[in-house]
Amino acid sequence: MEENTQTIGEIGYKDIFRQREYLKIILASLINRFGDSIDVIAFTWLVYAITGSAAWSAIVAAVNQLPSVLIQPFAGALVEGMKKKRLMVMADITRGIITAGLAALYLMDALNPWILLGFTFINSTVEAFRLPAAMAVTPQVLEKKYYEYGTALNSTLSAAVELIGLGAAGFIIGIFGIGTAIALDGISFFGSAWILSLLRLKEHSLAKGTLQAKTYFKTLAGGFSYLKGQPAIRNFCLLAAFINAAFMPLNSLQMPLIQEVLGQGSELLSIFSIAFTAGMGAGAFVYPLVSSRLPVRTLVVGFGVLIGAGMYAIVLPGEWQLSVPAIYGLTIANSFLIAFSTSILSSALRVQFMKTVRQEYLSRVAAIFNAGASAATPIGAFLVSAFTTACTVSEIIRFAAVFCVIIYLGIALLKVRLE
């Protein structure tokens, strides 16, 4: 009984290390993250090596997002009536087979752009089913009082593993080749599936026997109806979409920012990425301490404004024509600040989402949540592309920064409900 009376101030990371089933989920996630961090470099090289076209690279990136936007809301309703552990294991095995097959075709010199497009779509479709299941499993193995530290530990370790993977990717590709790097990502999926198969989880399917169309659409409609009646959850979805949209200028214009605005080369881009990943990890680590001292709306507004400030400041070193060391130092500081604030903001949204959504609706609403957030990416990319015809890179990033600050200050002034 004493354990149940713990407050957030009395809980620490040591308590999470006692949650054995949740640690299995973290370990599976870390294995996946390591493989993905290698693959994100290798796959980018692979797409360009096969297609030789920047346009094809953009098409593949867009197709990679389509299942999240178009399929995931409907997948969530199916996932709600299925055994989540089994689904996650089968999804990881399937993605492992797909990725290993892609590596084999590359090594046999049998890939072409259309095959690459098909593999990308199928892999992302499988992921569209896995993500809602993963979101729904967490509350079953982790008590609500541990959400802050559990989420923070997962995110912090993931950032550390991602840094290791990004650092190892160049070495692996350089020594063993792109095919081997992608094959390692495939192996990571099998490792994740094995860890998840050891998960002790008591769950019962909501749907007995074959899922009928009538039952499916009733389940799907129930998710949208529940979301409609929960203003705080709707605000979470809108805020997640806005976070993705606001980052599009910085994400899609990184190379022009580094080269045209800051006047530097690929070395600064690499350092920018490392500082960003480190900031994400640091933000996740301190999130439980921050969340115990600040109300949710204050936390969201404060760190949202810091994101906007960091984005505005990141273009200034080049415009001020500072020395190269000063440009490097300020870029690292701004990159870290943006990532640190984003990590805290994202952690707050995930924790509040799990705390607020009722367990029986979690898969459905999580699918809608993820789809809405993903939809902002292509929309933001389209707007950035349109703005580049009339504005400079600095102007676009500054506009996004000011707009970001205005939105978060509006959340404070309008007292938008987040709890």
Image (cartoon, rainbow, N blue to C red):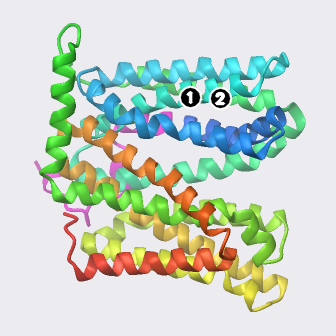
Determine the CA span between mark 2 and mark 1.
6 Å
Instruction: Say whether residue 119 is visible.
Output: yes
Q: Is 242 placed left or right of 142 in the picture?
A: right
Give the vertical position of 289 relative to 104 (above or below).
below
Q: Picture coordinates of residue 400 (x, y %)?
A: 52, 74
Q: Amino acid at mark 2?
A: Leu
Q: Amino acid at mark 1?
A: Phe
State the residue position of label 1. 121
What is the magenta range? 1-29
Q: Decide: few, some or many residues near mark 1? Use Cα within 10 Å; few <14, some 14-19, many ≥20.
A: many
Q: Is 304 placed left or right of 381 in the picture?
A: left
**Residue 136 occupies which quadrant of the picture?**
top left
Instruction: Say whether residue 20 is visible.
Output: no
Q: Residue at x 16, y 49 (%)?
A: 228
In front of the other: 200 or 277: 277
Q: Picture coordinates of residue 290 (x, y %)?
A: 35, 71
State the residue position of label 2. 117
In the rendered image, the residue lying farthest to the right is: 175
Mark 2 touches mark 1? (CB < 8 Å): yes
**Residue 294 occupies which quadrant of the picture?**
bottom left
Q: Is residue 191 magenta?
A: no
In front of the other: 231 or 205: 231
Q: Quadrant of the C terminus?
A: bottom left
In the rendered image, the residue lying farthest to the top is: 209
Give the vertical position of 147 relative to 242 (above or below).
above
Q: Residue at x 61, y 47 (%)?
A: 161
Q: Residue at x 26, y 36 (%)?
A: 364
Q: Picture coordinates of residue 16 (x, y %)?
A: 35, 48
Give the vertical position of 153 relative to 337 (above or below).
above
Q: Picture coordinates of residue 304 (x, y %)?
A: 41, 74
